[in-house]
Amino acid sequence: AGTYSVNGSAACPPCDVGTYNAATGAGECSACPLHTSSVEGSDELTDCKCVAGYTSTSDGVQCSACDARTYKAVTGAGECSTCPPGTSSTSGSGQLKDCTCLPGFSNLPGFSNTRADRGWLGIGMDGPDRPPGGAACAACDAGMFGTAGSADCQVCPPNSDSCSGSSLCYCSPGFKGDDGGACTACSDCTSTVTFTVTLAITEDD
């Protein structure tokens, strides 16, 4: 078991990673179920365990991707963990760092930036202000904005403003220009400012 033989060969090499063979004697190794893997030389179906980012209730069965806003960093059966407050992830995430800040938010004090995504800034897991349960993100203040690739929230350009949690700035009354761009004075533009606020709703499990 855990090896295979082809065409009656006396040599029995171990089954490859991601396969298993529970039988003795000649025969080929079987592929593990979808989204599972095994170590070299596995001799039981239950040696096939969920890969990171996938979940099941037991070993040796097909695994399902962790839902969005969750992650699973360990292999094998078990539940996915919820991303920290103010962060989200894509389906099938296999690491805590896959939980990145939502649009318009930035890293908290004492954390190092790991990734920015549409106005929210990802944070690391080091620092004296590490909150219980892992990382978290805070909204950029009014008059500031967060963009992809930034290390922190940035002050809006002259003659523009923003609401809390913004990923770009809008021109102040009496000025015109593209949102997020330079704003110039105008005499023929209205003073009405229209903008959209996106709220991030998090759940504490």
Image: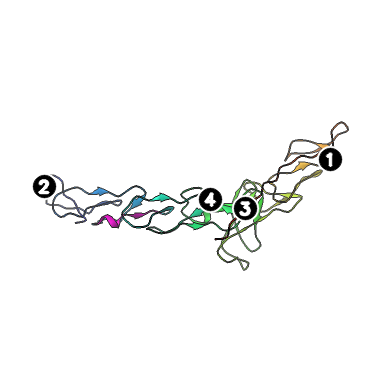
Q: Are marks 1 and 2 in contact (CB under 8 Å)?
A: no
**Over which residues does the magenta segment extend?**
44-51
Q: Residues within 10 Å of mark 4 (few under 14, many from 20)?
A: many
Q: Secondary structure at mark 1?
A: loop
Amino acid type of the residue that numbered disc 4 sits on in the rendered structure: Ser
Q: How far apart are the alpha carbons under marks 2 and 4? A: 49 Å
Q: Are marks 2 and 4 in contact (CB under 8 Å)?
A: no
The disc at residue 8 is 2
> What residue do we see at 55% from left, 64% from top?
133
Q: Residues within 10 Å of mark 3 (few under 14, many from 20)?
A: few
State which mark lies toward you, 1 or 2: 1
Dot 1 or dot 2, earlier in sequence: 2
**Which residue ends up furthest to the bottom in the rendered image?**
128
Q: Is residue 37 magenta?
A: no
Residue at numbered disc 1: 173
Answer with left or right where residue 11 lies relative to residue 113.
left
Answer with left or right where residue 48 lies relative to residue 107.
left
Q: How far apart are the alpha carbons under marks 1 and 3? A: 30 Å
The disc at residue 27 is none
* 6 shown above or below 41: above
Name the foreground residue: 139 vs 5.
139
Q: Are marks 3 and 4 in contact (CB under 8 Å)?
A: no
Dot 4 or dot 1, earlier in sequence: 4
Q: How far apart are the alpha carbons under marks 3 and 2? A: 62 Å
Amino acid type of the residue that numbered disc 3 sits on in the rendered structure: Ile
* 176 shown above or below 37: above
Q: Quadrant of the N terminus?
A: bottom left
Q: Secondary structure at mark 4?
A: loop
Residue at numbered disc 4: 89
* 173 shown above or below 58: above
